[in-house]
Amino acid sequence: MSVSANDNASKASMRGFLAKYSVLIAFAAIVIFFSVASPTFLTPANLFNVLVNNVVMLAIVALGLTIVISSGGIDLSVGVSVDMASMIFVMLLAAGYSGVVGVAGGLGAALIVGILNAILITRLNISPFLATLGVLFIGQSTQQLATSGGQPIYLTSGYAADQFNAIARTALFGIPTPVIVLIVLAVVVHLLLHRSVFGRYVQAMGAQPGVAWYSGIRVPRELSMVHVLCALLAGVTGILLSATVKSYVPLSGNAFLLDAIGATFIGTTLSRERKPSVIGTLLGVLLLAIVKNGLLLVGWNFYWQQVGIGVLVFLVLAASFGLRRAAH
Amino acid sequence: MSATVLHTEVGVSDEKQAAAKSAGRRFGALVVRLGAIAAFAAIMAYFVIFAPGFTSTFNLINVVEQSAILGVLAYGMTAVIIGGGSDVTEGGIDLSIAANMGLCAAVYATLLSMGYGDFLSVMAAIAVGMAVGALNALAVVGLGILPLLATLAVLNVAAGMELTLTQNTVVGASSPLLGVLVSGSFFGISALAWALIVFSAVMIVVVHGTSFGLRLYAVGGHPEAARAAGISVPFYVSFTYVLSGFCAAVASILTVSRLSASTPGSGELLLSVLAAALLGTVFSRRFVPTMGGTLLSVLFIGLLANGFQLLNVSSYWVNGVQGALILLVVAITSFARGSEGSR
């Protein structure tokens, strides 16, 4: 039976290959499908639109979550960081402050959310899931109280407001400014997570928290850093969001949460150990964005799109997890 | 009860030291648990004294009615967490439960408005709920996808199907069954309140009073040990997801009866369901999820919202206070648990 054993082994390695690259294969198949199905899909104008409107903001939030999930935690309060940054940014601009003050204030607000998470998780020993869930609730209340129940704040034309809106809509060397922001942040997070000592500590904490502690890693300090970084990245998204739509809509940040978690975990299927990575996360975000955009162009009913995305994510995960299980 | 006995075995190397430590630990845990319950009691006492009409029978029954939907959902979530273990990223969780309820409510209301009878519509809603649960089970148990991810994908599918079915509109519904649920009452307690009482009794008995429940805890607490003991782990884990789908279907009928319609936006309940299921762990001696604990935390969340309403405090505060309380309770809990060295 040596032939069949050999055969089985090659089948198993084939399955392993398919499992590893299932996301990439799915990605390529989807791009080809939509290119054929819709004449506008592959046009530069459309791809530009997908990048600016569907990818950048989600991707920046997902980068933050990638760091947190690498450390073995989770941050359910990314939406609050997005909203708080957006709220303070818009309020400051509306009050006539300059853009620099607005950005500093917005990032400061996100920083406070991150520090709060860090204190709850590292000082009070609350599990990340519950700590950030609690912060999510508190953040929602804070926004409702600050906006008398969720009234949006619109930026009427002021100098700083127009300037920011322009930044969100302009391009540098033919690349839209928000995309440049994303690329810079992605490179920084990639270096931080995969090429620095901090990143190695984060990975160690994610793989074996106990061992990381015994090895002398200052877990509380590194973990605080992780949550602060995640909140700050979400804050950048908040500022980009309100610069693009020239307003602050309360509780709008939560829409990023589930997609960002989904994208990060879709990205983990790229690695054998299921570790999150910056490249995997970006691929996950692209996959979600392209499917959303493609279904729209093909003319699917808006409500069916959510079903489509759910089914697709399910199938990609099923292929990756199921084939890997079969390969072992 | 018997289920907790199983959970008192901790990996012990040095028995003497551990015995001394565990006595102190138990005392600390007891103090913390009583402290948490005392904090709840203090808030309740405040409402009793200062909120007008808080203790009236009418008001209390009203709270129980309002809690019925959250309660039934939280039982489903609790079962999943018990069976899947409470690890942050790898443990059991059902993110699709609230969206599933929305889908079942849409199916139920749509079928009623198309003229199908109560029996058929209820059966269809339950079938849909359990089918969604079975899909979760297939993904988690059959394909080995992380529960957090699998149920996230199913959440999108269920929410999308609800939107497709209702086109994001309110679907009005009325039927004899809904009539009974809305206005019927037995022994002075309304039908909705009865629904919660009966459902709670069944869940508590099944999970904490039967060998089935004990095995469920074993599966969640230590899957390898459970399998070595001859328990079919896949069956029990699958069961919790299907049960969770069933709970979503039951809750959907309750919510349609309360609102006389299926309405979009039921997915927002998810966080409250999670909060209720996780907060409930404080009421257990070993800080594990229990059905009784979930019931207490559901009622507590209901009473909190109600007390605020009676005190004329803006409802915008409710979420924040709920969040702060979760943090407070869990911080105290983890302080007690910290001595066990679990983190």
Image (tube, coloured by chain):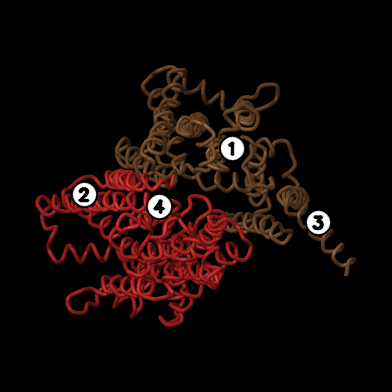
Residue that badge 1 annotates:
A203
- Toward which corner of the image does residue A322 lie, by quadrant? bottom right
- Callout 3 secondary element: helix
Any mark on residue B39, and which?
Answer: 2
- Toward which corner of the image does residue A3 lie, by quadrant? bottom right
**Is residue A72 visible to us here?**
yes
| Neighbour tally class for label 4: few under 14, some 14-19, many 20 plus, Cα within 10 Å | some
Where B217 falls versus A219 (above or below)? below
Residue found at the very far right of the displayed protein: A3
Upstream in sequence: badge 1 or badge 3: 3
Question: Which of label 2 and label 1 is nearer to you?
Answer: 1
> What's the amino acid at mark 4?
Leu
Q: What color was chain A assigned in the picture? A: brown
Query: Is circle 1 on the same chain as circle 3?
Result: yes
Using the numbered discs, state the Cα–Cα distance from disc 3 to disc 2 in whole angstroms: 58 Å
**Is residue A241 visible to us here?**
no
Label pair 3/4, CB-CB below 8 angstroms: no
Query: Is circle 2 on the same chain as circle 1?
Result: no
- Callout 2 secondary element: helix
Along the line of sight, which residue is nearer the eye, B12 or A120? B12
> What's the amino acid at mark 3?
Met
Q: What color was chain B assigned in the picture? A: red
> What's the amino acid at mark 2?
Ala
Residue that badge 3 annotates:
A14
| Neighbour tally class for label 1: few under 14, some 14-19, many 20 plus, Cα within 10 Å | many
Residue found 26% across the figure and 60% down from its top: B299
Residue found 74% across the figure and 49% down from its top: A21
Quadrant holding the N terminus of chain B = bottom left
Quadrant holding the C terminus of chain B = top left
> What's the amino acid at mark 1?
Gln
The x, y position of residue A198, in whole percent, is 57, 29
